[in-house]
Amino acid sequence: MFFARPRTSTRLEVWPTFVDALSTVLMVIVFVLMTFVVAQVFMVETINDRDSELAKLHNQLKLAEFNLNNAKIQHKNATTKVTSLEEMIKSLNLQLAKLTQDISFEKNKHEDQRTLNERLKTDLEKLEERLRQLQSILQQAQTDTIAKDEEVKKMQLSLQALEKEQEKHKDSIRVGQFRSQFFEQLKNILDTRSDVRVVDDRFVFQSEVLFAVGSAELGNEGKKQLDELIKALKEIGKKIPPEINWILRVDGHTDKRPIKSPQFPSNWELSAARAIAVVQYMIQKGIDGNHLVAAGFGEFQPLSVEGEGIDRNRRIEFKLDQR
């Protein structure tokens, strides 16, 4: 019994110690595990950092390889250029050697040529002096020739002007002859009318024969009178040679009494419109427009200045003339 009591007490005292030891072991294990986990985390981060650095190094390696290839290509091009330049330098050296040889040869010839040049220079100076003398003589001859040419040209122009004037005078005489025939026929046709007359070298119709007062429209009676004139003009026109450039001038005239209408603001417009109306009617009847001309004089070419004769100023004049 003595030994039994202590044995029981000993068992109870060992258990806390065992529990403490087990707790310590567990704590150690937990610490080791924690240490391992932390080490593992640091190791993973280290591995990731090394992978990033490895990737960077890999990219740098690719870039270095690319630069190396470019450098090789540039080196190859540079080598080609150097080879080409070396060949060019060889060619230039050959040319330089040839030029040096030619210069040496020319230097040897120069002395002989110099003496020859001196003689040629003396001869050339003599020839230049002779040439200046000949040029002076030639210039004087040219001056005389130009003066004579000018005189000849002036004489030719004067002769041409005289010939043209003579030809024009001849044509004028011939036109005058045909004008006389034309007026003679018109006189025979219209001799009984007092409102149609001859004034100098013109045949004159009073405006009332052809137009109403203030109008530029031909009346029926006026057209009949013009038909007789046109008939005579056609007959005479057939007789006139084609080389004579003749015209029938139709002049419109008014008196000094003013006119102002929407159609005719002044006597200028009225006289010109009447002359144009006559020319247009003659063209319609077969007269070539190349032989007709219309002009309006308004009241500024009167036949009578004052008195009852002022009515004579309203007229249409026809003149066969040379262009």
Image (cartoon, rainbow, N blue to C red):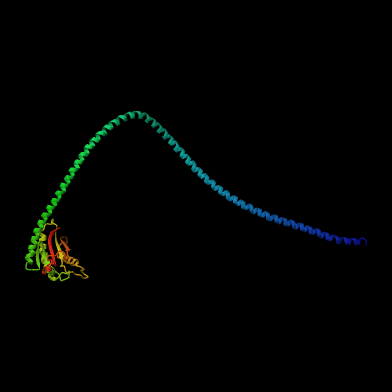
How many discs appear? 0
Q: Which residue extends farthest front?
A: 306
Point out residue 229 in the picture as x, y percentages from the top left corner.
11, 65
Q: Is residue 238 left or right of residue 32?
A: left
Which percent across, then down, holds residue 180? 8, 60
The percent coordinates of residue 222 (x first, y second) are: 13, 69
User: Residue 247 vs residue 89: left or right?
Assistant: left
The quarter of the picture where the C terminus appears is: bottom left
Depth check: 174 or 140 in front?
140
Q: Which residue is drawn at 19% across and 43% down?
A: 147
Percent across and percent down for residue 321 are 13, 59
Q: Which of 201 and 86 is in front in this view?
A: 201
On the question of residue 123 being in view, the answer is: yes
For residue 195, what is the image quadrant? Answer: bottom left
Could you tell me which residue is drawn at 90 percent across and 61 percent down?
6
**Above or below for 288 versus 81:** below
Residue drawn at (62%, 53%) of the image: 52
In this rendering, the answer to whether 226 lies above or below 69 is below
Relative to 123, is 168 above or below?
below
Question: The N terminus is located in which quarter?
Answer: bottom right
Q: Is residue 226 visible?
A: no
Q: Residue furthest right?
A: 2
Give the residue drawn at x 41%, y 32%: 100
Q: In which quarter of the image is residue 223?
A: bottom left
